[in-house]
Image (tube, grey):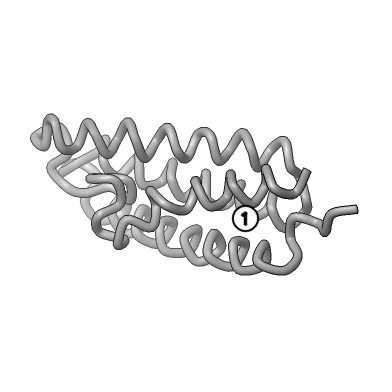
Amino acid sequence: MTAPIGSGPGRALIAVYGLFSLAAGARAAVQIAGRFSEAPLAYSLSAFAALVYIVLTVALARGARSLALAALGIELAGVLIIGTASLVDPTAFPDETVWSAYGRGYLFIPLVLPLVGLYWLLRRR
């Protein structure tokens, strides 16, 4: 029998996602409240990233494997799509999102995190 997804190193994964939930959520709240008209797409995408991180934190903590896998897929797709779009057309993103340039502003952790999460979940079958 394998250990629950929230045990061992899974706890660290939950903690990192919890931290990213707070960081992305606070960033989006400040951006949307103070200067939404400057970059509505970027700030909306930061809020969406925060929502994905919240869902992942809760799903991993509760052992909701299917939800976590779906959210990890959404996160990885978001990082790759937004990361690429922000490099190809920087004018579309007058301010950075959490996922801009593959998470450059967050030390590329947004690019690595879903891969680690997928690896962890797929090992826990």
Q: Which x, y percent locates residue 41?
A: 26, 35
Answer above or below: position of 41 versus 36: above
Q: Residue furthest left?
A: 91
Answer with left or right where residue 11 lies relative to residue 114: right
Q: Which x, y percent locates residue 93?
A: 17, 38
Residue drawn at (46%, 50%) of the image: 50
Query: In the image shown, does 35 or 64 lie closer to the viewer?
Result: 64
Residue drawn at (52%, 44%) of the image: 52
Numbered disc 1: secondary structure: helix
Q: Residue furthest right?
A: 1
Query: In the image shown, does 115 or 65 lie closer to the viewer?
Result: 115
> Which residue is under mark 1?
57
Q: How many marks overall?
A: 1
Answer with left or right where residue 105 lies relative to residue 91: right
Answer above or below: position of 111 versus 107: above
Location of residue 13 (image quadrant) = bottom right
Answer above or below: position of 93 versus 22: above
Query: In the image shown, does 118 or 47 lie closer to the viewer?
Result: 118
- The C terminus lies in which quarter of the figure? top right
Query: Mark 1 Cα within 10 Å, few/some/many (few <14, many 20+)?
Result: many
Q: Which x, y percent locates residue 5?
A: 74, 55
Q: Amino acid at mark 1?
A: Thr
Query: In the image shown, does 39 or 56 lie closer to the viewer?
Result: 56
Residue drawn at (61%, 47%) of the image: 55
Location of residue 17 (image quadrant) = bottom right
Answer with left or right where residue 116 lies relative to residue 91: right
Residue drawn at (8%, 34%) of the image: 91
